[in-house]
Amino acid sequence: MQNKVKVNEERIVIEGKDIVRLEYKEPDAREWGGFAPSVGLEYDETNRFLLEVSINYNTRKANKYLAFNATELKEKLLGDLKRAGVYDRGQEEISHELVMEKRASISAAIKSLKLQAENQSVPEPVSSNGTPQPILPLAEAV
């Protein structure tokens, strides 16, 4: 993975988990049928758990005789990840349901953190004497 051109990297800490979103560009288009795709990885660095993999590949820019289809892209990418030591055979046996459950849990935690951040930036209404006023639903305020 050292020869990959890193395009973007984001980190967020949620409930003691260090979630990393990494995007890189493949360096050699010849290995990919004439078009070098960009690859996105999302993983829990703390628990060493791969959460999501995405690939952006433009078949129109690839050689029309060598362009990869979806199955070939998946096989090539997973083979590259295995050779790089990103995951081992034991991890392949983890059930899809467990992966989806963990992904949903992390997504919910991210949404919760974003909501908390948004709520903290909104000032509380204050009356003329300086006491906080309750926020009323629009129907009750009219």
Image (cartoon, grey):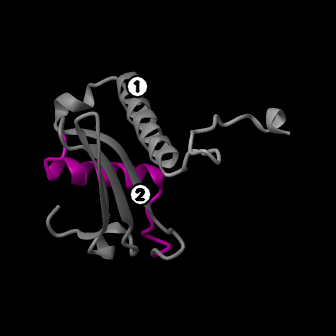
Judge whether 69 appears above or below 24 on screen: above
Q: What residue lies at 18% left-to-right and 33% top-to-bottom? A: 89
Q: Which residues are magenta?
A: 63-87
Image quarter in which the C terminus is found: top right
Image quarter in which the N terminus is found: bottom left
Of residues 58 and 38, which is closer to you in this image? 38
- Give the image location of residue 101, x and y in percent: 40, 25
Q: Is residue 106 magenta?
A: no
The residue where tag 1 is placed is 101
Q: Amino acid at mark 1?
A: Glu
Q: What residue lies at 72% left-to-right and 34% top-to-bottom? A: 136
Identify the secondary structure beneath mark 2.
strand
The residue where tag 2 is placed is 55
- Give the image location of residue 117, x and y in percent: 45, 47
- Give the image location of residue 83, x and y in percent: 15, 51
Q: Is residue 74 magenta?
A: yes
27 vs 133, left or right, is left
Q: Amino acid at mark 2?
A: Ile
100 vs 21, left or right, is right
Of residues 87 and 76, which is closer to you in this image? 87
Judge whether 70 appears above or below 23 on screen: above
